[in-house]
Image (tube, rainbow, N blue to C red):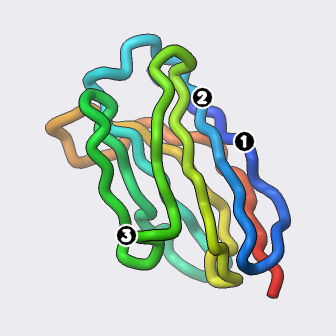
Amino acid sequence: QVQLVESGGGLVQAGGSLRLSCAASERTLSTYVMGWFRQAPGKEREFVGSIVWSGGLTYYADSVKGRFTISRDNAKNTVYLQMNSLKPEDTAVYYCAARRARTTTYTFWGQGTQVTVSS
C-alpha cells in the first residue's frame, strides 16, 4: 500500500508559478511510475504528466508541455510538479497517483490539492 500526500496548491495569478509536491510512504519507488492528474469542476479527470521513477523519463499532456515539469527526489520519496506560465484553464484539483511499472492502472491516489489561477 502506497500512501500519497500532495501539497503546494493555492491561488496564483495568470502567468505565475506553483510547485506541487507529492510525498510517498513507499520507500522503494524504483518499480513505480508516478503520475499527475487534474480535474476541473464539471470536467473529467485528465492526465497531466508522469515520471518513471527509475530513470526519470517523463511524459506530458500537450496542454502543459513546455510549461510544467515533473521531477523526483529519491532521498525524500517525493515527486514534484513545477507549473509555470499558469493559465486560468489550469484551475483544477491536482492529484498525484502511482502505478507499478509495466501496468496501466494507477492504483494509489492522493487526496488532491486545489490550484486556482485567477485572470
Task: For label 1, count other residues whose C-alpha is less than 10 Å away and answer few (under 14), some (14-19) or many (20+).
Answer: some
In the orientation shown, which residue stands out farthest toward the bottom?
Answer: 119
Point out residue 76 in the picture as x, y percentages from the top left corner: 56, 19
In the image, what residue occupies the spot 66% across and 40% down?
A: 6
Q: How far apart are the alpha carbons under marks 2 and 3? A: 22 Å
The secondary structure type at the circle numbered 1 is strand
Residue 23 bears which disc, if any? 2
In the image, what residue occupies the spot 70% across and 83% down?
A: 88
Point out residue 87 in the picture as x, y percentages from the top left corner: 66, 81
- Earlier sequence position, callout 1 versus callout 2: 1
Q: Quick check: marks 1 and 2 in contact, CB under 8 Å?
A: yes
The secondary structure type at the circle numbered 2 is strand
Q: How far apart are the alpha carbons under marks 1 and 2? A: 8 Å
Q: How far apart are the alpha carbons under marks 1 and 3? A: 21 Å
Residue 86 bears which disc, if any? none
- 102 sits to left or right of 96: left
Q: Is residue 66 above or below residue 21?
A: below
In the image, what residue occupies the spot 72% across and 41% down?
A: 7
Q: Image quadrant of residue 39?
A: bottom right
Q: Is residue 113 above or below residue 85?
A: above
Residue carrying label 3: 61
Q: For the N terminus, which image quadrant?
A: top left
Under mark 3, the amino acid is: Ala
Point out residue 103 in the picture as x, y percentages from the top left corner: 19, 40
Under mark 2, the amino acid is: Ala
- Earlier sequence position, callout 2 versus callout 3: 2
Task: For label 2, count other residues whose C-alpha is less than 10 Å away and answer few (under 14), some (14-19) or many (20+).
Answer: some
Under mark 1, the amino acid is: Ser
Residue carrying label 1: 7
